[in-house]
Image: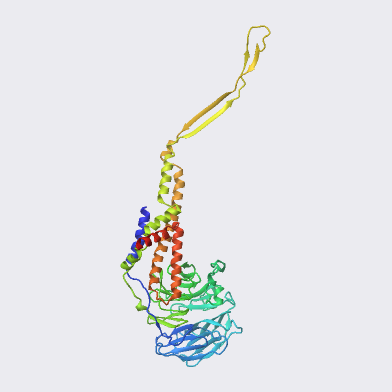
Amino acid sequence: MNKLTVCFTVVWICIMVKVAVAQDLIWDNIGRENFNLQVVQVHPQDSKIIFAGVPGNIIKTTDAGKSWRNILSIWSGARNINAIVFNQENANILYAATDNGLYRSKDLGGHWERIFRGKSYLENQCTSILVIDNTLFVGTKAGLFISRDAGRFWYKENGRIGSNLILNIDANLKFSRIIYLAASSGVFKSLDTGNTWELIFAPNLSRIDAGELLLDENKDEDRKSSDIRYVKVSKDIDLVYFSSAKGIYKSLDQGKTWEKLTEYGLLNRDIRMFHLSGDGRIFALTYSGVFIYQDEHWIEASFGITGNLNYLVLDHQDNIYIAGEKGIFKSRLKNLSTFKRQELLYDYLKHEPKIRDVQLAAVKFAEVSPDKISQWRKQAALKAVLPQLRMGAGRNTTDLWHWESGSSAIGQSGDDLLRRGRDSIDWDVTLSWDLGELIWNDDQTGIDVRSKLMVELRNDILDQVNKLYFERLRVKQELDNLAIEDRNKRFDKELKVEELTASLDSLTAGYYSEQLHILAINEQG
């Protein structure tokens, strides 16, 4: 079991070396009396100036949330505020994408004008906005609209994008003019400022887990029909991410190839939107939590936030803002707490079966023990010592005739007759040895192939066991840190613990739960 020991040692060292990890953020609700916030945006140079959207209104604060005032009211039936974006060349200009068209203000929200309105109900529902010089890109629920003259004249992109639901648009304007667009049918890229578009990722919508998009009643109906959620470009022009109902994907070559980030630590892999910090961390938003991706795993950072969450944004001073059902929550990233893990880890481990015992149980249940291969090799070597036994038997049917002379008496019957003799039975036994197999046995080749496959299978099983085991410890620790009033999150985490327990039981034939029960009895005794 040397390989098992090495595997366990590596996992243990990785955990013990990480003596400090991000745990949770301290959140302050700066929304005051405002609720059901749909979007939030911070001035790129002055973090005290914040804009937010509630159904039918855009509100503004100039004192970091101490007081708010209404600066735009929408009186139509479609009142959702979907995005607020600043002009990167002129921070006094901002745009608001609403369900009643696109609005623009040239004086930080003092005055507004509607510069785009679609011809249909869906075209009128603007979801996102990107500004490049005098070119405006507006995503709607019925396609993409482009203006090359700062909003005077608009035309619809009728190419590959067509009338897709546009979810968001992003570009790294400092280093590149490559535009990325997330639509219901996939992720698109344009190298020529929107003249042509290339589909760089097309999800197989039929492969979405059954019922996965229908579990959350709070999700938008339009999003349920699509796997895609959000796209974001890094400061590295070759690095781009997009989120989906199944997690976040990363590309290191401008979308030519994609790899999926790990899901470990996510309570809900349906990432609504996300942002990238300057130090490479990813801040992801689900409908019920905020998660930070670092060191190749996710950590929840939304303890203390209640209600459904709708929007996430970072500012230039390392502050993070969340717009949600209960208000606007703000926290400073530098407040990420750190702590020594050894004592806390030992406290949790003493209530769990040892990881090596769980590994051995999984290996035994899957019948992938290294001893199995060793036994096969010994038996193959003994094959050359044992002889090959062959036995044969048959009847000799050759006709044998002889004269029966009989007695000399006159008239005696049977005298001087030609008679047929009895058949003879032949048999043989043969023993043979192939002594060359003592040096090389052809069966060894087959064993080598099976050994390779078994090692791969065993490593996959051990990898699953390790991840599930330590993920369960992490979720238990997060569960213990939850406030009593966080009932929804408590339920999610308790459900996650049970899910991980069931997964470990399926790999160990129930050994994990059996050992938990034994440990609980011993503690009570």
Residue furthest out toward the front: 525
Residue nearer the viewer, 166 or 193: 166
Left or right, 485 with reference to 402: left
**Does residue 339 show up?**
yes
Residue 171: percent from the left, percent from the top?
47, 78
Q: Residue at x 40, y 78 (%)?
A: 304
Residue 300: percent from the left, percent from the top?
41, 73
Residue nearer the viewer, 105 or 384: 384
- Which colour style is shown? rainbow
Residue 337: percent from the left, percent from the top?
34, 75
Residue nearer the viewer, 111 or 380: 380
Rendered position, 366 above or below 28: above
Left or right, 88 with reference to 199: left
**Does residue 263 show up?**
no
The C terminus lies in quadrant: bottom left
Residue 23: percent from the left, percent from the top?
37, 73
Using the rendered view, name the quadrant where residue 88 is placed. bottom left
Rendered position, 103 above or below 17: below
Residue furthest out toward the bottom: 111
Residue nearer the viewer, 209 or 276: 209
Q: Residue at x 41, y 43 (%)?
A: 378
